[in-house]
């Protein structure tokens, strides 16, 4: 136990308190401290213990500011917890602070949404001003601030930064289950295994236990709820046996819905009712932002009545219910992502101990969500941060004409597009008039046929949360096509395909039907699939279809023959902009030639830039004839753009990577592309030839210098004559000879 600490802590919690004290008392430590604390590790207790010890032993003339995300009333939960374990410490909320100010030895718990959410009127303009006045009053009294940012991933906004900066805190402590190490900050990670060893969280997570490979299902919810309820009953029975009737622990099943989809919620409610679980008998509760139903005050207590809780993503942060043992995550085939915090909701042990029984010491997830792994990776792999930079004075007067698409330019009509796609399939796969033979040929090239929608179900036992993202263990799921139930999934697939050719969903669906579905009088028909087969074909093959459709658009188009000319307007370099920054950069150096103040090599590492971009920025920094270099954005009206046409005559925007001003006043516009490595082409842009020609025409009309730049063997080559893929061609010249 930390000397003098009156709060009982586990060893790893004590170690974290000691580490925080070391960071906050060492004059050589950085201001911001990041703590990565697995969900269930007791971060609230740790932070209370730290605050208590700091006030006791370091500096009592300190006020703590505890910032919490708004969902789940986490600030009130945290304040209540401090009142329980350290009742002698003064606590207050935002409105107390606005009335009475900030005082030494106090902790002020603030809900982020009260002060940062757009349109929130909980804090009026006068109170907003008063907040900063109260902070200033405390500073005049010599009070130090330490700011704690709970669930720090939720508060990355400019408004949040303004508030944090106003406190001029001695230290800022950021805590999250998904925190990322950053060289600008002190960093400490609580090992998930230490939390497991103390019995605070389950020994392991089991995903899709009992689901077999090639399982045939009708509805996700129907199948998953049956298997989840069977598991819930087994757990409940085992608790009765282990606890011998001395205590009641009623395991809770969380049912997580994607956003929207009220029809799915209704279907689940009907399914639960058929199983004997209703709102009326108290077995079901609902917790959604727009709809909270039959939520008992003791929902989180071990003996609470509800055994099913309907919820959405919003509940994933700041909610503690240790009896939750099972998660059913439903999908709708969209981009809903699975969050690490959601897993954490079911990993807590209800009595903060293990029972040496796998049924009770494990937690269980049942889902057919194919975005599960993607969502986890997205949460864990975002290793960069974002910084705002300001434009140098000498760049503020620069202008250049940019092009914008004319939205009235519709490109080829539906019939012409159909013909082009038909011809492309015939040419690529050597298809003919025999539709049965065409089907066999397409099968040989990876297309899937049948009347079942195929999916994937992750399965396996995982001790550490991050192991889930590394898993390659999947089962196949099969659903017999139901045109009513799968209508939405078909449209999602069509929506994915349409992005390749830039046409409305309805027209793309019609083209697909004329090419592949039985019926109609289209002469351009490659297959004659029955309705159910057609649904399954589009849904199962959406990625391949998207690529084949995209190949049609990459055909070279005459870039000078615009039926409707692109619009133009004046481009100015943004006076401030946000850039991705790599906090792990080594031997960081300032790039003095960049258009923005404080731009360094940390903005141009392999985490953020391609090899060619990195080499180009390094090259520009070495040259003494360059006045400034501007890195253009990838999309958005504030950036420099040129219009090009694809093979279907649709207009698209192309954002050249760099604008360079030479000291002699010459302006260069540069586009970087993947080069060659080990004799292989690294370029992945199918529209490269169309963009090249559009770029060439744009530069010629405005007497600009320009070029496409690619890398080979760590050297840069430039081409502004005729595009050829092979970099051995004479059109690719060493950049030093031209630029």
Image (cartoon, rainbow, N blue to C red):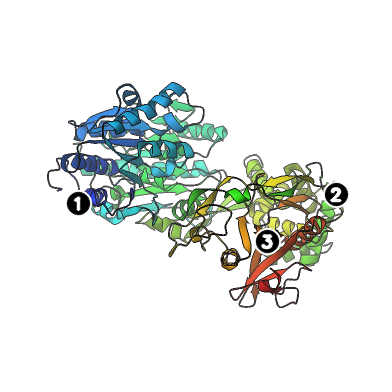
Towards the viewer: 495 or 108:
108
Circle number at residue 11: 1
Dot 3 and dot 2 residues touching (CB under 8 Å): no
Name the residue rendered at 61%, 77% in the picture.
678
**First-in-chain label (1 vs 2):** 1
Compared to residue 357, the image places residue 241 above or below, namely above
Towards the viewer: 132 or 192:
132
What residue would you read off at disc 2? 415
Quadrant where the image shows the C terminus: bottom right
**Residue 115 at least partly seen:** yes
Towards the viewer: 191 or 591:
591
Q: In whole angstroms, how far apart are the C-alphas of marks 3 and 2?
A: 35 Å
Name the residue rendered at 32%, 32% in the picture.
109
Q: In whole angstroms, how far apart are the C-alphas of marks 3 and 1?
A: 55 Å
Give the image quarter of residue 424.
bottom right
What residue would you read off at disc 3? 671
User: Left of 715 or right of it: where is 353?
Assistant: left
**First-in-chain label (3 vs 2):** 2
Towards the viewer: 259 or 248:
259
The residue tagged with tag 1: helix, strand or loop? helix
Give the image quarter of residue 560.
bottom right
**First-in-chain label (3 vs 1):** 1
Q: Where is residue 129 drawn, in percent x and y? A: 42, 26
How would you rate the neighbour count of disc 3 (Cα within 10 Å): few for under 14, some for 14-19, many for 20 or more? many
Q: Nearer the viewer, mark 1 or mark 2?
A: 1
Give the image quarter of residue 674.
bottom right
């Amino acid at each position: 136990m930390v000397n003098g600490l009156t709060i009982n802590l586990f060893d790893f919690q004590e170690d974290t308190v000691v580490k925080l004290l070391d960071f906050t008392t060492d004059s050589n430590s950085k201001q911001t401290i990041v703590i990565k604390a697995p969900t269930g590790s007791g971060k609230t207790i740790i932070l209370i213990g730290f605050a208590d010890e700091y006030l006791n032993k370091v500096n009592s003339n300190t006020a703590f500011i505890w910032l919490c995300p708004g969902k789940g009333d986490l600030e009130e939960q945290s304040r209540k917890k401090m009142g329980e374990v350290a009742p002698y410490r003064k606590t207050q909320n935002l409105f107390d602070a606005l009335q009475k100010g900030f005082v030494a030895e106090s902790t002020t718990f603030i809900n982020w949404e009260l002060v940062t959410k757009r349109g929130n009127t909980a804090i009026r303009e006068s109170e907003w001003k008063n907040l900063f006045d109260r902070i200033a009053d405390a500073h005049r009294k010599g009070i130090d601030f330490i700011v704690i940012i709970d669930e720090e991933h939720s508060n990355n906004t400019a408004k949040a930064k303004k508030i944090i900066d106003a406190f001029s805190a001695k230290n800022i402590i950021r805590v999250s289950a998904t925190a990322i190490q950053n060289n600008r900050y002190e960093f400490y990670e609580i090992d998930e295994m230490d939390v497991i060893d103390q019995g605070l969280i389950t020994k392991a997570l089991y995903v899709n236990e009992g689901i077999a490979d090639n399982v045939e299902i009708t509805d996700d919810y129907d199948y998953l709820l049956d298997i989840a309820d069977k598991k819930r009953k087994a757990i409940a029975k085992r608790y009765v046996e282990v606890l011998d009737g001395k205590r009641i622990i009623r395991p809770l099943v969380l049912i997580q819905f994607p956003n929207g989809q009220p029809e799915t919620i209704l279907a689940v409610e009907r399914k639960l009712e058929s199983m004997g679980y209703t709102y009326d008998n108290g077995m079901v509760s609902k917790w959604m932002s727009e709809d909270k139903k039959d939520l008992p005050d003791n929902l989180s207590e071990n003996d609470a009545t509800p055994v099913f809780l309907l919820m959405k993503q919003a509940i994933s942060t700041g909610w503690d219910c240790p009896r939750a043992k099972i998660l059913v995550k439903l999908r709708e085939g969209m981009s809903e992502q699975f969050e690490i915090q959601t897993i954490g909701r079911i990993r807590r042990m209800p009595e903060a101990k293990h029972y040496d029984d796998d049924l009770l010491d494990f937690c269980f997830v049942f889902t057919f969500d194919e975005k599960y792994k993607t969502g986890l990776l997205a949460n864990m792999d975002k290793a960069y941060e974002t910084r705002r930079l300001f434009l140098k004075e000498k760049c503020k007067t620069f202008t250049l004409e940019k092009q914008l698409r004319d939205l009235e330019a519709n490109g080829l009509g539906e019939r012409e597009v159909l013909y082009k796609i038909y011809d492309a399939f015939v040419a690529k796969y050597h298809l003919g008039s025999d539709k049965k033979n065409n089907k066999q040929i397409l099968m040989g090239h990876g297309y899937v046929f049948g009347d079942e929608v195929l999916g994937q179900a992750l399965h396996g036992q995982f001790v550490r949360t991050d192991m889930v993202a590394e898993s390659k263990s999947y089962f196949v799921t099969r659903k017999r096509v139901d045109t009513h139930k799968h209508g939405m999934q078909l449209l999602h697939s069509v929506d994915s395909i349409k992005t390749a050719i830039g046409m409305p969903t309805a027209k793309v669906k019609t083209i697909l039907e004329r090419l592949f579905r039985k019926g109609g009088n289209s002469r351009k028909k490659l297959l004659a699939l029955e309705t159910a087969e057609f649904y399954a074909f589009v849904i199962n093959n959406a990625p391949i279809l998207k690529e084949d459709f995209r190949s049609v658009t990459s055909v070279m188009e005459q870039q000078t023959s615009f039926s409707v000319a692109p619009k133009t307007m004046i481009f100015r370099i943004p006076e401030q902009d946000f850039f991705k920054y790599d906090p792990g950069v080594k031997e960081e150096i300032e790039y003095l030639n960049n258009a923005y103040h404080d731009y360094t090599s940390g903005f141009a590492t392999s985490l953020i830039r391609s090899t060619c971009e990195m080499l180009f920025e390094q090259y520009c920094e070495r040259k003494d004839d360059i006045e400034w270099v501007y890195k253009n954005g990838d999309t958005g009206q504030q950036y420099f753009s040129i219009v090009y046409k694809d093979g279907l005559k649709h207009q698209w925007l192309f954002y050249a990577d760099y604008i360079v001003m030479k000291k002699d006043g010459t302006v260069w516009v540069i586009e970087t592309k993947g080069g060659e490595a080990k004799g292989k082409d690294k370029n992945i842009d199918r529209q490269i030839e169309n963009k090249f020609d559009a770029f060439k025409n744009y530069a010629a009309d405005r007497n600009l210098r320009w070029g496409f730049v690619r890398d080979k063997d760590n050297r840069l080559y430039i081409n502004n004559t005729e595009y050829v893929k092979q970099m051995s061609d004479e059109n690719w010249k060493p950049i030093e000879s031209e630029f």
